[in-house]
Image (cartoon, helix red, strand yellow):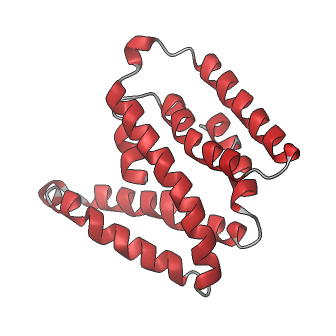
Amino acid sequence: MNLAFYASLAHLPIGVAVTVEFLGPLTLATVLARRARDLLAVAAAAVGVVLISRALQVPLSQIEWTGLGLAALAGTCWAGYILASGRAGTQFAQLDGLALAMTVAFVVTLPLGLRTVPTWTGESVAKGLGIAVLSSVLPYSLELAALRHLTARVFGILLSLEPAAA
C-alpha cells in the first residue's frame, strides 16, 4: 500500500494522490453500508472528495496515468488493509498481527531497498527510520486499536478526513 502510494507521488501532487487513494476506503464503506444513514455518510464523504478535487485546481498536464494507477492500487490495498486489520485485531493479541504484517512487508520490499544500500548515509537511514515509524508503525498501531472498536464501514467513512488533511 505505502509503496504504491509513495511511487504515485513521483507522478502526482500529494492532494491528487491522496484523493484517488481515498476512493478505496470510500468504495469499501459504500459496499459495506447497511443503512440509509451509512450511505448518507458515504455520500457526504464523496462530496468532500469532489470538492477537494475541484479545489486542488491541478492542471491536467500534471496528471499522469501511471500516478493515477499507482494511487488507485494504493487505495485498493488500503481497502484490503481495513478488512485485514479488523480481522487481525480480533485474531491476534496486542499488536502481534501488526508485527507479523510489518515483518512480511519488510521481506517483500527488501529486494527494492538492498540495491540502494551503497547510497545510504547516516542521515538517510535516520530519515528512513523516522518515516517508517511515523507513516507505518504509529498510525497502523492506532488504526488497529480503533478497528477493535469500530466496524470497517464506520472506519472507512471516518477516513474521509484524510484527503482534506493532505
Most distant residue in the bottom direction: 93
Q: From the viewer's perspective, tell me whether residue 151 is left or right of residue 21.
A: right
Residue 76: percent from left, percent from top: 48, 48
The reply to whether residue 159 is in sight is no
Q: From the viewer's perspective, tell me whether residue 142 is left or right of residue 2.
A: right
Identity of the residue drawn at 36% across and 67% down? 105
Q: Is the C terminus in the top left, top right, bottom left or bottom right quadrant?
A: top right
Residue 3: percent from left, percent from top: 36, 51
The reply to whether residue 120 is in sight is yes
Most distant residue in the right direction: 37
Closer-to-camera residue (10/92): 92
Residue 121: percent from left, percent from top: 23, 58
Residue 8: percent from left, percent from top: 38, 37
Quarter of the image for residue 89 reads bottom right
Q: From the viewer's perspective, tell me whether residue 44 is left or right of residue 46.
A: right
Reply above or below: 17 against 30. Answer: above
Reply above or below: 121 against 39. Answer: below
Identity of the residue drawn at 39% across and 64% down? 129
Reply above or below: 76 against 129. Answer: above
Reply above or below: 108 against 8. Answer: below
Closer-to-camera residue (105/69): 69
Q: How many labels sit on residues?
A: 0
Quarter of the image for residue 125 reads bottom left
Identity of the residue drawn at 51% across and 75% down? 98
Identity of the residue drawn at 47% across and 53% down? 77
Closer-to-camera residue (112/76): 76
